[in-house]
Amino acid sequence: MSNTASILSILACLALGTIMALAGSPGSITFNGLPSFALAASIGFILHWLIFIPSYIYQTEHYFDLIGSISYISIVLFTFLALNNLDVRSILIGLLILVWAVRLGSFLFIRVKRDGKDNRFTVMKTKFWWFLFTWTIGGLWVFITMAAGLAAMTSAKVVPLGWFALIGIFLWLEGFLVEVVADHQKTRFRSKKENQGRFINEGLWSFSRHPNYYGEITLWLGIAFIAFPVLQGWQLLTLISPIFVYILLTRISGITMLERRADKKWRDDPEYQRYKETTSSLIPMFKRKNKEKK
């Protein structure tokens, strides 16, 4: 990515973050005279920019995913400590985000330390503006993904838990379990010497080529369901959270990047081509019939 494209992308991230902060702030409980929603949103950006500096100096990506999780945790803890008399909905959302962030953050940090590097950053970490853009979008990712939940946690409106919360809890549990199991299965698969250079097509990965991303999208959809009843006016714009996760993981990074890499690596492997043709890209489902050439 060129310097110009990187700088413009950074400005776009900041513009999108500002719009979301303005949308979620009306109806937000204030802290020292300022909307707590906007204050909490700034935490993720600040932490990412602070850690970017030593990461660029020492040319390392080891702390990128970890600081993302620390940002989620810091925002939730800020909300818990800064606001008084949080209701059950706010506490529930905060705890669900904390559990997810601690689990995923530790998993990704251990993985990158074990592997020694993350191939996504090989080139970009040598380019100042491109690397800064990546850390900036990391801050945006934290904010937008939890925007609906954060808006509900900081909302002055209180509504008893109901069917939306029950549906949301079910979706979160489903997504969390799928993500945890998928990550565990892939880690175990890669740990075996006989699987070096092979693609995983067993367990949940036999029903979806990216079950971990399905779990990620589903759990954030669950958070949005829990948050919805207390959102009002412009706060409803924060419901873009699960849509943002879906678009980013399926259209921008995530699946798009991994599929391109897999196609290059196994393009001459008929078993992989058969796996790709018969297995869902995202939603776990039974295999499609293979269309054999006659």
Image (cartoon, rainbow, N blue to C red):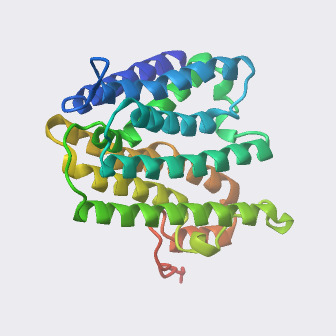
Task: Establish if 81 lies above or below 89.
Answer: above
Task: Establish if 185 lies above or below 101.
Answer: below
- Relative placement, left or right, of 93 versus 139 is left
Give whichever of 17, 262 is nearer the camera: 17
Q: Residue at x 27, y 17 (%)?
A: 33
Q: Which image quarter: residue 240?
A: top left
Q: Residue at x 72, y 46 (%)?
A: 110
Q: Is residue 139 visible?
A: yes
Q: Which image quarter: residue 203?
A: bottom right
- How many callouts does the rendering have? 0
Report the residue that reaches farthest toward the front: 85
Q: Position of residue 216 (x, y in %)?
A: 47, 55
- Relative placement, left or right, of 47 versus 266 is left
Give whichever of 178, 123 is nearer the camera: 178
Q: Position of residue 217 (x, y in %)?
A: 42, 55
Task: Establish if 184 lies above or below 289.
Answer: above
Report the residue that reaches farthest toward the left: 233
Q: Position of residue 175 (x, y in %)?
A: 46, 62
Report the residue that reaches farthest toward the right: 193
Q: Residue at x 34, y 39 (%)?
A: 150
Q: Residue at x 30, y 55 (%)?
A: 226
Q: Which image quarter: residue 210?
A: bottom right
